[in-house]
Amino acid sequence: MTGWLGVVSRSHVQRGVAGGFAQVCHGKAQPLRRMRPGDWLIYYSPTIEMGGEALRAFTAIGEIADDEVFEHDMGGGFVPFRRRVRYATAREVPLADLKDRLDLCAQPNSGMALRRGHLLLTSGDFATIARAMDVKVPDVKAPVPA
């Protein structure tokens, strides 16, 4: 089991939680294909709405449910890819509460890493965030270098 981070506005995360799906990187398929059933996804929301007021919080956590990456027609020609997720009941946690304990934030270019929209978390970071969100999850594997 691997821990992932998705970077999405809170309003979009809430739609995913309500619908039981994940969507990252403006609907791209490849990031979703990197995840496997049993992996876990934590969402970090830099804003409340896309392009809106700053939030900077971890807003949801869930387990990847199956192997299927599927398209969903949202209308207006936008057909993003999605992945089914079983979301846990979790509390929202401000990044500021954990920043000093996360390897991710110790990197000089952590803001640039978050702009990728989807990345592996170290096992320590994943456990720290999950605990802060009051979610008990299995131990994660350390990421394998690409």
Image (tube, rainbow, N blue to C red):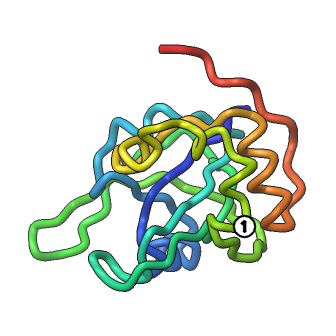
In the displayed structure image, the side of residue 112 where residue 2 appears, left or right = right
Residue 40: % across, % down: 67, 46
Q: Nearer the viewer, residue 116 or 136?
A: 116
What residue is shown at x 24% (from left), y 67% (from top)?
A: 73
Residue 72: % across, % down: 31, 62
Which quadrant of the figure contains the N terminus? top right
- Above or below, 56 relative to 107: below
What residue is shown at x 47% (from left), y 14% (from top)?
A: 146
Hey, which residue is sitting farthest left in the picture? 77
Residue 7 placement: quadrant: bottom left
Q: Nearer the viewer, residue 28 or 9?
A: 9
Residue 144 placement: quadrant: top right
Mark 1, secondary structure of its residue: helix
Q: What residue sits right under mark 1 in the picture?
A: 97
- Above or below, 131 relative to 67: below
- Above or below, 10 relative to 37: below
Q: Nearer the viewer, residue 137 or 142?
A: 142
